[in-house]
Amino acid sequence: MGHKIIATGRSRTGIPTGRLAVWWVVGSEIVIFGGLIAAYLLNRFLHGSWEVSAAYTNTFIGGANTFWLLTSSYFVVLAHAAAEKRDAKTARKYIWYTIGLGGLFMGFKSYEYATEISHGFTLFTSNFWSFYYTATGLHGFHVLCGMVIMAIIAEKDIKHEQNWHRVENIGIYWHFVDIVWIFLFPLLYIAK
Amino acid sequence: MADTATATAGVDHHDDHGHHESFWSKYCFSTDHKIIGFQYLFTGMAMGLIGGFFSYVFRMHLAFPGSSIPFFGVVSPAAYNSLVTNHGTIMIFWVAMPVLIAALGNFLIPLMIGCDDMVFPKINRLSYQVFLLSAIVLIASFFVPQGGFGGAWTAYPPLSAESQYNGTPFGAPMWLIAVTLEIVAFLLGGINFITTVMNARAKGMKLYDIPMVVWMIVIASILFMASVGPLVAGAVMLLFDQTLGTGFFDPAAGGDPVMWQHLFWFFGHPEVYVVLLPAMGVVIEIICTFSRKKLFGYKMILYSSIGLGILSFFVWAHHQFISGVDPRATYLFTTTTLLISIPVAIMLFAMIGTLWGGSIRFTTPMLFALSFIAEFLIGGVTGIWLGSSGTDIYLHDTYFVLAHFHYTFVPIAIIGTFSAIYYWFPKMFGRHMNEFWGKIHFWGTVIPFNGIFLPLFVLGAAGQHRRIAGYTAYPDLYTENFQDLRVFATGSLIVLILFQIPFFVNFVVSLVRGRKAEANPWKANTLEWVAPSPPPHGNFGDNLPEVYRGPYEFSVEGREKDYWPQNEPETAK
């Protein structure tokens, strides 16, 4: 546009604008997942039959996926620490580890979906399964988006040693996606 | 000479760099907050024409059932349902929200906080593009086989969930997708607004120096963000119900249709305050400027609006008093609903307190602002019957409800918007609108507005049910004297629509040939009047203003001038 924008660099609160915005994104996402989880809980209390359906979810895969996601959060913290030290090589390495674990999560998830569908538990089997696929699907979509954004940050920003703050911002988002899973895992897999 | 050169150096940024923008990059793909504000404004006004046309068609149908409506033809029951549904949807989501929040927020926030742009200009542009896409999807939904969605703007399942009930296999999902896209656009825009006000305020501008309209837009954005999530979740579920055949809201499949009502109204009621607060902010700015008085109770208004926002999350089930919610819950929701009138009353009384003893100038924006108080009061007071579960059980889903919420939404969306346009037009386009035609437009809007909706209170109290396409089909509901009232309301609507023509002519003619406006024609204090009219890209040139005081220092004793701009140092006379 040819015009220098001053506003972007200003910070009355002392918090960078990007980080503030990510927190607001997280805030708006909390209520989206909050609505979904609240609707799930209401139904769960109303319908005793959901316990029976929940018994068919694969706790082992769910647990393993919890493990991958939590580990990936650890790596994104390491990436942030490396970005603070302006160590592009290490930061990129850890971002890619995070993406890799996200991929592992998605792989397990796909396998899980495939086996469930082959056992006849589809989106339409019952309302429990409708919720299961909607909630985990929406969550998986967020994981996928995070992976894509991280790949862009690693290859476009960090490789060229610019926009270092984006590592922290995607980290905040990634932790949020993790925390959503921390809620979904007990609701869908453990509470039987 | 040297002074003029430095003063204009910032203004002519583009020429300095030999940088010329094409029409497309300047007006269609600009990241300038003002241009994006205009895009929202004009899109909102265009959608308002569509929504207004819909109301003309179904009101004509109600006045003259079965006859052919000029410019439309005979209204079938399915078309009637689609018209009322999309009238409501358009007016809330594609007129009130884009104009009051997005257009005003985009245009005013950076100017009023003394900043050169939004902190995320590209996200800002993206937000408008997503919004435009949502409008296109909605308009396209009218032209698909079997027409646009007809399940009412609240989209209660199972009517909305299955095409065998609403008869719109394509219109219904498209309507849902359009609404969801629109919500995404406003989430993007809202994040930008909040972050900008938090981080990019002018030097010296403390929290209590922020103009009220900026506060109101920010609080409204936060309210929107905090309330809309459940509706997004619900929209996804409803979309699955419509297109894939899941049964989230289908009792036959073990689902619960009342759950949709909770998800919808958890958002739906705070939404009233999302659009109310910016309109209140506009009215406050105008009342202070044209009564030359300091705002009465700045902090009180601010705390009230925050309290109002918090309370608005605990009122949603008053829409469900007859939906089979626990009767004990109705005590709670009656109480919270009645409580919410307290902060609203505080704000309205603060406005009246500001007027008290002021030297009032009845300009067009001021007339609209004053009528906002009067008309909104009727809307607020009639809400008391609907908030109380006892009377609501009788009045629910009658024309009384319809008249009540039009007495709140029309002052908010129509009167609030017009007062804002008349007030900020000189700043937006550097020219004045014609006052005479403005006043004609004012009386031609406010009088017929009452002519439309006062009769509907009578109809509603008499038990007339809303959302019925043809009363003649129900002899018990059809009586001649009611028909007179319907004809009267429809006639008033047509008068109101005709009186919008002077506005549009005035708008366009003023845009081209209006009297040139100086930087601060109303002698107001806030920072947007420091920038030239119209403000250039970058707003204030090279030097951003610095703030020394609050925004409403009118008629301060011991000063020559009766106003004291926020950026004027103490030493200046």
Image (cartoon, coloured by chain):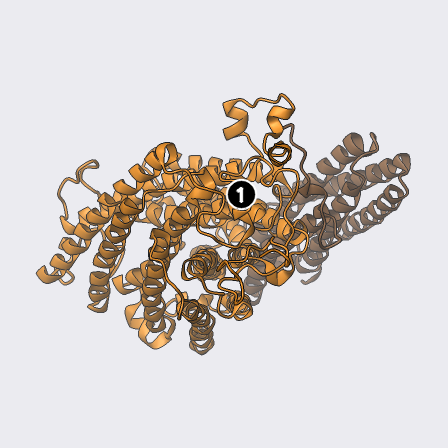
Where residue B565 appears, as percent x and y from the top left, is 55, 55
> Picture quarter containing residue B488?
bottom left
Whether residue B54 is visible here, answered yes or no, is no
Q: Vertically, is B286 above or below B431?
A: below
Relative placement, left or right, of B297 versus B493 is right
Residue nearest the observer in this picture, A28 or B536 = B536
Quadrant of the snapshot with the N terminus of chain B? top right
Relative placement, left or right, of B306 versus A96 is left
**Residue labelled with disc 1:** B185
Which one of the lettered chains is coloured brown? Answer: A
Relative placement, left or right, of B221 versus B91 is right
- Toward the left, the furthest residue is B480
Which one of the lettered chains is coloured orange? Answer: B
Q: Residue at x 33, y 34 (%)?
A: B509
Q: Vertically, is A185 above or below B327?
A: above
- Secondary structure beneath disc 1? helix
Task: Give the letter of the chain under mark 1.
Answer: B
Residue nearest the observer in this picture, B476 or B573 = B573
Q: Residue at x 19, y 55 (%)?
A: B489
Where residue B146 appears, as percent x and y from the top left, is 31, 37
Q: Callout 1: 10 Å neighbours few (<14), some, many (20+)? A: many
Q: Residue at x 34, y 71 (%)?
A: B381
Quadrant of the snapshot with the C terminus of chain B? bottom right
